[in-house]
Image: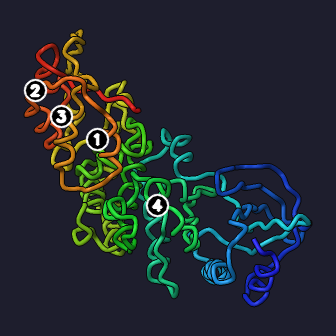
Amino acid sequence: MNSNLFDNALKESKINICDYTSFTILDKIGESNSGYVEKAFWKSHGRIIALKSLKVEMDLNENIIREFVAELQTLHEISEEHHPHILQFYGIAKDNKERYFLIFQHADSNLRDYLKENFEKLTWNDKIDMATEIVMGLIHLHEGRKRIIHQELHSMNILVHENRMLIADFCIPKWKRESTNTTSHGIPAYMDPRYLANHKYELDAKSNVYSFGVMLWEISSGRPPFKSLKGRDEITYQIFAGKRETPIEGTPEPYIQLYSRCWDDDPDKRPEIQEALEDLRAIKKSGILDNLPAEHKTNTKNLPKDYKSVSPISDQKNVKFLDQMESSEQIEINKSGLINDEHFKLISKWINKTPPKSGIISKRFAQIKPKVKQKHDFKLLVRGSRDGFLPATFHEKCDNKGPTLTRSPK
């Protein structure tokens, strides 16, 4: 980056500029393609903070640099409002190697890791409180002076400090957003399906409501959405097909209804963010959480022991995907009837007829050149893909009775 242009733009802003020597580095706490994060002690302020390295392209022009500084200025102004559920931005630091670092409030963890480490101890009152804090932060972003729409809302951008939820990474530079696309930017499981289908789709408040709905399910389950699926393409296809995660047994019905509305494919059917807050408060006040059976007041204990190995997806009409898991008889499967790569072209013809028109899915099948022509009856497959099968039904209809579709990553 042209450091002189960047320095000049910073001086014209109200952003705090600090010397890197003001900090004592304690530990590196994270690293990604976009840079790394260090835990540090801010000597002059007597507090622990996080330093996030600033990794940008070297050839950015003056206009892009000014746009980026404007984003930082927005961060600064929002932080001046000191909302309890928005991560605080303190300024920017520069070291003697011309490297820049963003200075943020330090947090202990992110929501995904927090759930992984603490889920067994969380009550439903705790979960409702967590969801309420997140939605309060979103309301502040949406309805505040800056009218911010979070561009990458997911559980790793919700930080947790002393059990308090903090929304982070809500200002992504425009140049960075435009230089990426749906195949490399964001996490598909949390993204508005309209954006997945067309990465030029402009995210709005209802897009954030969709992402929030996915996080509501994650809070109820303690695990990331679509954990059993492998690869971005597979998750994207399932979302295009209308699939959503299955409600966890013991989840209060009003909570299920809320996140089901939030992640509706039609933005007009999703609730307003303020309405989501009101629904959460109503659940808390209703007393329904106190009336839950003892085994459901914390985590779900009476799911099948191997539920994590089961594909959790179902469409919204089939919310009882796991009902018969314990009674599903596992029998030896005759592998001679498995459909192989030679038949995938036939299957891809059906896939290409589905409403979403995305090259992400079709590219995988376009490379397959079958050696033989063989007809198969895919009525069972099509109906199962459309309506969703209970595991017991799948085994009853498919085991040793005909071709079974198997699919592995290429």
Q: Are marks 4 and 2 in contact (CB under 8 Å)?
A: no
- Of the two numbered discs 1 and 4 on the same chain, state the one appearing first in sequence: 4
Query: Is residue 66 rendered to the left or right of residue 166?
Result: right
Q: Which residue is mark 3?
A: 346
- Residue at horizontal 18%, vertical 34%? 346
Earlier in the chain: of badge 4 and badge 3, it is 4
**Which amino acid is tagged 4?**
Asn
Q: Position of residue 55 (x, y in %)?
A: 70, 62
Distance from label 3 to label 1 (Cα)? 24 Å
Q: Residue at x 48, y 67 (%)?
A: 151
In x, y percent, where is residue 152? Answer: 49, 63
- Image quadrant in which you'd find residue 403: top left
On-image quarter of the N terminus: bottom right
Q: What residue is disc 4 on?
A: 181
Determine contact: label 1, label 4, CB under 8 Å.
no
Residue at which label 2 appears: 375
Q: Amino acid at mark 1?
A: Ile
Under circle 1, the secondary element is strand
Res. 313 mark = 1
